[in-house]
């Protein structure tokens, strides 16, 4: 019933917008046939220091340290456990590796239990919810942003990390591949722990590639600036209003006009 109602509702519209092509495809599969267009969600990134800071200028917390970061709500669908499962293998090659987990959610107790069972609690930091300057500091103190989730909401946090200059390792998912390609990220299959470990080791050993990914990510994140997205919305409203006026004019011409004498 919900799908039928959504299909009926959207088909009454002049235009449907979505932040990703994946959502539009899902709507098409449900029978939505009206015009649709991708319009990105704006992110106020102009003040982010990562936009101007090179990879080598990022602060470090100590020699040999290599910090991974994930930002997002801690629920099972985010698959944060995939990253924790990679830590034991990483420790053998990067003894000072650490994983900063930013966020809160129902999965946090099980994630803490997993870290304890794998004996990596000293390498996994749960720091809770962060925003503003504290979140910027967390990004700035990290080396790689990792997301093994396919959730649509992770697109925005990934863009934030790219704006901060971080190279990205991400799971292939419909919502993320629209923003990420080989020039901006290392893409892996969700659940492939071995590929995740290899990708992290690659960026640890190849600073030039990490810097190139970070620079390409910063350039792509600039597309989420509010100004060009506001211009897109102005264009959309203009087009929809123009079509609406044309329909009203056509409808008025189609109404039969009285031809007999007036009484």
Image: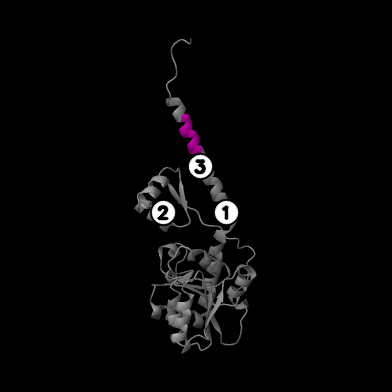
Q: Earlier in the sequence, mark 3 or mark 2?
A: 2
Classify residue 189 by image quadrant. Answer: bottom left
Residue 104: percent from left, percent from top: 52, 71
84 vs 9: above or below:
below
Mark 1 crowdedness (10 Å alpha carbons): few <14, some 14-19, many ≥20: some
How packed is label 3: few (under 14 Cα within 10 Å), some, or many (20 or more)?
few
Please state which of residues 117 and 232 is positioned toward the viewer in this rendering: 117
- SS under mark 3: helix
Reply yes or no: does residue 233 show up in magenta: no
* Distance between the alpha carbons at the discs numbered 3 and 2: 19 Å
Sequence order check, earlier mark of 1 and 3 = 1
Which quadrant of the figure has residue 150? bottom left
Predominant secondary structure in magenta? helix
Residue found 38% across the figure and 77% down from its top: 192
Q: Is residue 244 left or right of residue 31?
A: right
Do the CB atoms of the residues marked 1 and 3 lie less than 8 Å apart?
no
Q: Please name the residue shown 45% across and 62% down the image.
A: 152
Which residue: 46% across, 80% down? 84
Give the mark, 1 or 2, whose residue is nearer the N terminus. Answer: 2
Which residue position is annotated with label 1?
228
User: In this picture, which residue range is highlighted in magenta?
Assistant: 242-249
* Real-space CA distance between mark 1 and mark 3, rounded to the nearest whole angstrom: 17 Å
User: Is residue 254 found left or right of 208 in the rendered image?
Assistant: left
> 207 or 165, which is in the foreground?
165
What residue is shown with label 3?
239
Residue 11 x, y percent position in the rendering: 40, 44
Query: What residue is disc 2 on?
Result: 24
């Amino acid at each position: 019933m919900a799908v039928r109602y959504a299909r009926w509702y959207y088909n009454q519209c002049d235009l449907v917008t979505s932040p990703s092509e994946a959502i539009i495809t899902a709507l098409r599969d449900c029978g939505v046939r009206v015009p649709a267009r991708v319009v990105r969600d704006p992110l106020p990134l102009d003040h982010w220091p990562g936009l101007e800071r090179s990879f080598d200028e990022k602060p470090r917390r100590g020699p040999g340290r290599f910090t991974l970061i994930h930002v997002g709500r801690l629920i099972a669908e985010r698959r944060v456990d995939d990253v924790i499962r990679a830590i034991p293998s990483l420790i053998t090659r990067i003894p000072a590796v650490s994983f900063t987990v930013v966020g809160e959610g129902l999965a946090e107790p099980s994630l803490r239990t997993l870290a304890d069972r794998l004996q990596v609690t000293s390498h996994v930091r749960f720091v809770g919810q962060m925003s503003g300057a504290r979140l910027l500091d967390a990004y700035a103190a990290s080396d790689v942003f990792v997301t093994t989730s396919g959730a649509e909401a992770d697109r925005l946090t990934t863009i934030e990390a790219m704006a901060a200059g971080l190279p990205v390792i991400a799971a292939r998912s419909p919502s993320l591949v629209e923003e990420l390609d080989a020039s901006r990220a290392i893409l892996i299959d969700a659940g492939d722990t071995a590929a995740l470990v290899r990708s992290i080791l690659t960026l640890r050993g190849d600073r030039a590639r990490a810097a190139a990914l970070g620079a390409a990510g910063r350039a792509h994140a600039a597309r989420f600036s509010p100004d060009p997205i506001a211009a897109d919305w102005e264009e959309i409203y203009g087009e929809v209003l123009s079509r609406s006026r044309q329909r009203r004019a056509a409808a008025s011409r189609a109404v039969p006009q009285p031809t007999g004498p007036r009484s």
